[in-house]
Image (cartoon, rainbow, N blue to C red):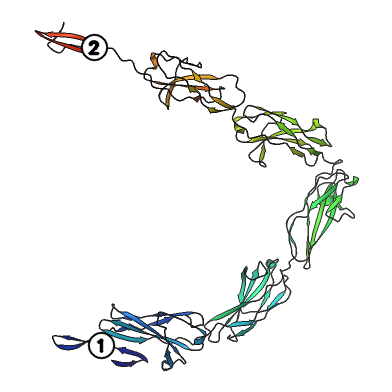
Amino acid sequence: MRKIYCNKVLLLTFSAIFLAGGIPYAAAAPTNTSLPSITGEATVGTSLTVNTGSWSSTQVTFNIQWFSCSTNLSTSCVAQSGRTTGTYLITTSDLTRYIRASVTALDATGGSTVFTSLVGPVVTPPQASVLPVITGVATPGSALQATRGTWSGAAATGDQYQWLRCTSVDTSNCTVILTGTSNTYTVQNSDASFRLAVNVIVRDITNRISGSAKSLTTQPVLGSPTVSSTPTFTSNLYVGGTATIDRGTWSTSGNTTYLYQWQRCSIQSITACLNISGATTASYLVSQLDLNQYLRVAVTAINEVGGSTIYSGFSAQVAATAPPVNTSIPIVSGSPFETSIINIISKGQWSGIEESKLLTQWQICTTAISCSDIPSATSATYTASSTDVGKTIRVKIIAPYSQKNVEAFSNQTPIIKKAYTNVIPPTLLSSAYIGDKIDIFKGAWEGLAISNISYVWQRCISATSCTNIPGATNSSYTPSSSDRGYSIRVGERPSPTTAYAFSEISNQIPTLVAAKKTITCVKGKSTKKVTAVNPKCPKGFKKK
């Protein structure tokens, strides 16, 4: 074995001695062509990985040995017992030390060992013992300031501040809105209703790794209230009644107060409106002065930051009397089949309107709450049609009112079914033979009452290939010679608009077999009998 020092990299070469024809010679051990290297960050808790480099021989195996070094000189390195795999987990015992690895390549001729460069020193990410703190009032236009926090292992300069917008009190649901070296941030209008936080990022003293710590979130940013939907009236307006207003949808935070001011307008124009004295709540008792006038409401939202005002639209013209009131729902009844008539049993109980003034509108429903008007269906009765099958029917009773009609809805009918549905098809009571009458057992039908059943008899080649037998429309049928070679079936229906329900096909009626006859044929002294439907003598023979 020989030691070669080159550029402070130790190369150990082992040679094997072979004998060939009694003469000894040395075979070359694997030669390193590209030094091994270490990848990974030299920080506590991470792993380093060794790349074995490139070698002259391809049939090699590798032995790894990791070293821990007290300085950046290879002479300070000590082999680490048991650390012989391709990776090295850095622990706190490695802190401030350097790491290197040796790679030994072995093949059949011998082995060579080379070393990686040293990596390090091993450091630990900076740790915050005191979190950053935000000071200032979180309102649009104001400036917030963040402290750095207290750190161990951090460089004195090079800090980065990430300002965060958060949807909850913790910092798990935040987005970065600004990154830079400044520890101040001016609150924007777009921050309203969100919480703010800061993430401080520092570097270690070697400027190789970083650590970070987040502050607590601020209170939600207070912005001036803004409205996204205008106020709307939520009641009919009539003399003596209480008018109510929905203030609309507002985006606001903090302690928000809502103020109201009702106005009386002679026409639907803002120049024709005057404030009503004392009408400053969300409701207003309509007076005789408001008859035939229009009402409007100003809604103002105020919080600690500011306020804004929005006006409702104009109301309908104030009526003299209250709207009609329904106290019991309408009732309908009828058979739940197409072509059946559905009747209004009661239009319900009403106050404030005469029954003769009530209007009717029939509706078709696909669910308990999904109904739509049936065009032109406004009479006292309704006849169910084929388009209603599978749905239900109800009636809407309408009480006309100057501002908004009052509506009441009846019960829904059961699901409308077809007028007639075959439950059991007809049955042939006997087999089919020429001259023998075939009687049937009538089928069973569900639906409306049946007053008359019509029949049709058919000849069939198969169950799917049948044709009507002319004139065969009674409840029984006697096969004739025309039916030879066919099967027979019967169809019945309770109305001309209903499809026939057919029985099973009968047996096939046998075809007519022609009778055979025998003749005697002679030729000289020879005779021959021939039997056939149309017998003929062979050539040379004559019929006797």
For the point 73% across and 28% down, which residue is it? 380
Which disc, if any, is residue 534?
A: 2
Residue found farthest to the front: 430
Instruction: Find residue 51 and report its image quarter.
Output: bottom left
Apparent side of residue 69 relative to residue 449 in the rendered image (left or right): left
For the point 84% across and 50% down, which residue is it? 272
| Residue type highlighted by circle 1 | Ser
Pointer 2 or 1: first along the chain = 1
Q: Is residue 375 visible?
A: yes
Of residues 443 and 312, the one drawn nearer to the viewer in this rendering: 443
The dominant secondary structure in magenta is loop
| Residue type highlighted by circle 2 | Asn
Apparent side of residue 136 relative to residue 488 in the rendered image (left or right): right
User: Magenta span covers which residues?
Assistant: 235-239
Q: What is the distance, in whole Å, between disc 2 and disc 1 at their CAs?
A: 114 Å
Of residues 451 and 82, the one drawn nearer to the viewer in this rendering: 82
Instruction: Find residue 163 and report its image quarter.
Output: bottom right
Instruction: Find residue 515 and report its image quarter.
Output: top left
Which disc, if any, is residue 15?
A: 1
Q: Is residue 144 above or below residue 392?
A: below
